[in-house]
Image (cartoon, grey):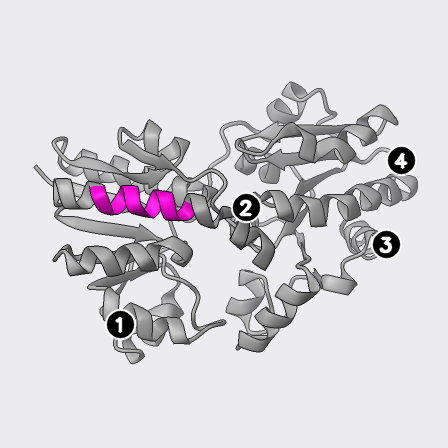
Amino acid sequence: MPNILISCGEPSGDLYAGALTKELRSLDPTARVYGLGGDHLKKSGAELVAHYEGLAATGISEALAVLPRSIKIYRSMVARARADRPDVFVAIDFPEINFRLAAALRKLGIPVVYYIGPQAWAWRRGRFETMRRLVDLALVIFPFEEAIYREAGIPVEFVGHPLVELSEPTEGRESFLHSQGLNPTAPTVALLPGSRPNELRAILPELTGAARLIRKQCADVQFVVARAPHLQHELFESICALQETGIPVQIVESRTDNVIAAADVVVTASGTATVQTAIHQRPMVIVYRLSAVTYRLVKAFAHVDNAGMVNLIAGKEIVPELLQERFTANAVATEVIRFL
């Protein structure tokens, strides 16, 4: 009976972990999968050693705030590995905790497979050295990554992007918009503000302002907002304020593919959703804002000029990126109206 320990730390990784577990169990129904994850991993039949909720952080102060919980989960995972001696440890992205777990489990003689490694080719290339020491096999999802990892001395295989198979809407545009009380024939803008609380605090106020400006220039426009299931409703108060002014906007939980597929244009935080939007072939505007200190640190370690994966793959800005001080309600509205 295969004994597999798995670890992911945010919604996209949880989605991939759930899909991987289903595939593993279809190959061998006796496979025992357990570890750190979320609802997708649990629904796939795996046992949750711990839930990832509250672990993801994008700023220095937020990272310090989640440190005690990270340490507690790390210790729980290592203790479980010592007790159960899994045949393999599968780390999915999220190097903040997975590098430490990989180091500890490697000392126990447990092979480490890293599925969707950190984008060290884009920033913090020193992580390649860490992976070379800790990882028995890296599974990468973009074709160009294979050569980069191999050149870094890391055993690697290209396996394709899981979203190509997983990004399927469960409803057509008309049915979905009807179910949300919206007009299927009206121009529709999807707002994807991210999956971390600090992302929403930085991004939603500008998106709310942009929605008001867009509505002034396009009287029949409507909005759909994607909400990750673990996010508290209070984070969406600015969107609720839009509803109170009569602007047609709906918050939709856990159905990001339906939200994207039903839209005429998508405004998305930089991250996994940019890839989903590209798969659905929808025009998009990429936005993001970090604290000034965190942004300076990112720039110091960055080796690329763009943030969105579509632009990184293209090697140039083919999709508008509004980052930091360029990310304003006016700028978002201007870009969106070009597409409507």
Asked which secondary structure carries label 2, the reply is loop
Q: CA distance from mark 2 to mark 1?
A: 35 Å
* Above or below, comparing residue 149 to residue 326 in the picture: below
Q: Disc 3 marks which amino acid?
A: Asn
Q: Position of residue 170 (x, y in %)?
A: 49, 28
Identify the magenta region. Answer: 70-79
**Secondary structure beneath label 1:** helix
Labelled pair 4, 3 in contact (Cβ < 8 Å):
no
Q: Amino acid at mark 2?
A: His
Q: Earlier in the sequence, mark 3 or mark 1?
A: 1
List the residue tagged with mark 1: 132
State if disc 1 and disc 3 touch (CB < 8 Å).
no
**Where in the figure is residue 137, as x and y percent of width and height?**
22, 63
Question: For the point 79% across and 41% down, which residue is it?
Answer: 208
Q: Mark 2 vs mark 1: which is more N-terminal? A: 1
Q: Which mark is residue 35?
A: none
Picture residue at 82% right of the left edge, 30% below the top: 241
Label annotation for residue 219: 4
Q: Which residue is mark 2?
A: 280
Residue at position x 53%, y 33% in the image: 230
Residue 77 lies in the magenta-colored region: yes
